[in-house]
Image (cartoon, rainbow, N blue to C red):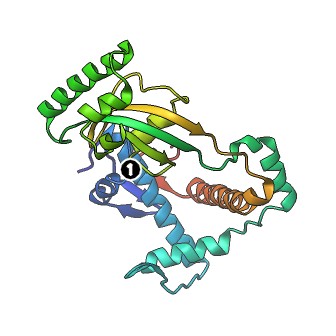
């Protein structure tokens, strides 16, 4: 019996079982409390897959499976879909003029990575220990208040109270760049100005940190010749993605689909 919340899906007369859609839904995000949205996204993904396979058959596409990773080869269906898209989508490389025009619109967007010279004080706790995390946060709050009041120098407080090995250097971590630390720590580094301290402790899997930006070197704007190869590649990929979306949207628009509303996604 069909569930009214998850109606039966048919694509050009081919039924796609709700169990298959439910399994696929695990791969799709939906806001909390809206599981039906993930289910509809899964239904659309499986619909597009079915239509691509049908189109490959209609065009008489044949394909050999290729290696896509260590000890991993495409399935027969994956190979057919890849070959179909290669046959159906023809995207030209962007011209030198187009790449330069894109760069020239906002050259300041294309910079070398910044360098951050950072110090911190760590109040360590186990990520799975809620009570320990509460105690560590309270410790960090007390230390931060002492710093705000000017009662102790940052380096002295780090040397006496930090749980990180950097305490031997007054909390100094040296120079860091993007990707050198955990995401939560990097996020605060991107917000701090030179000489500024985090307004409140920052939580990572290591515990609670009080962070100070000792020196900041903003990445320099890169010249066009340096940017050009990667920018051209990004523009070509964006054009291919847009063309693939138009192609699959056309297949969906012309198909006989019954069941969940997938066209509005």
- Which of the two residues, 87 or 224, is positioned nearer the viewer here? 224
Q: Is residue 256 at least partly visible in the picture? A: yes
Give the image quarter of residue 144: top left
- Which of the two residues, 186 or 73, is positioned nearer the viewer here? 186
Q: 125 above or below 262?
A: above
Q: Position of residue 18 (x, y in %)?
A: 30, 55
Q: Position of residue 257 (x, y in %)?
A: 48, 54
Q: Residue at x 65, y 45 (%)?
A: 219
Drawn side of residue 257 relative to residue 229, left or right: left
Q: How many marks?
A: 1
- Which of the two residues, 218 or 74, is positioned nearer the viewer here? 218
- Dot 1, how many residues are within 10 Å of its Cα: few (below 14), some (14-19), or many (20+)? some
Q: Residue at x 79, y 61 (%)?
A: 94
Q: Position of residue 150 (x, y in %)?
A: 38, 15
Q: Residue furthest top?
A: 149
- Which of the two residues, 155 or 252, is positioned nearer the viewer here? 155
Determine which residue is flagged by label 1.
28
Q: Position of residue 143 (x, y in %)?
A: 28, 23
Q: 108 above or below 101?
A: above
Asked which secondary structure carries label 1, the reply is loop
Q: Residue at x 52, y 42 (%)?
A: 116
Q: Residue at x 52, y 27 (%)?
A: 195
Q: Is residue 264 at least partly visible in the picture? A: no
């Amino acid at each position: 019996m069909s569930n009214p919340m998850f109606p039966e899906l048919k694509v050009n007369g081919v039924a796609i079982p709700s169990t298959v859609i439910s399994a696929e839904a695990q791969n799709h995000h939906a806001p909390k409390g809206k599981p039906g949205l993930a289910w509809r996204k899964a239904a659309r993904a499986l619909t597009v897959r079915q239509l691509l396979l049908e189109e490959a058959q209609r065009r008489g596409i044949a394909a050999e499976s290729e290696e896509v990773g260590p000890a991993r080869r495409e399935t027969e269906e994956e190979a057919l879909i890849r070959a179909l898209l290669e046959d159906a989508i023809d995207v030209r490389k962007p011209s030198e003029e187009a790449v330069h025009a894109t760069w020239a619109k906002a050259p300041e967007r294309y910079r070398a990575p910044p360098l951050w010279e950072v110090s911190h004080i760590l109040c360590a706790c186990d990520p799975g220990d809620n009570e320990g995390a509460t105690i560590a946060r309270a410790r960090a709050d007390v230390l931060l208040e002492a710093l705000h009041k000017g009662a102790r120098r940052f380096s002295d407080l780090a040397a006496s109270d930090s749980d990180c090995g950097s305490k031997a250097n007054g909390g100094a971590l040296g120079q860091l760049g993007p990707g050198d630390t955990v995401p939560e720590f990097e996020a605060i580094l991107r917000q701090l100005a030179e000489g500024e301290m985090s307004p409140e402790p920052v939580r990572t899997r290591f515990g609670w940190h009080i962070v100070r930006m000792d020196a900041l070197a903003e990445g320099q704007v890169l010249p066009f010749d340096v940017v050009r190869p990667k920018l051209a590649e990004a523009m070509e990929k964006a054009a291919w993605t847009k063309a693939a979306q138009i192609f699959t949207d056309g297949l969906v628009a012309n198909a006989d689909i019954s069941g969940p509303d997938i066209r509005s996604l």
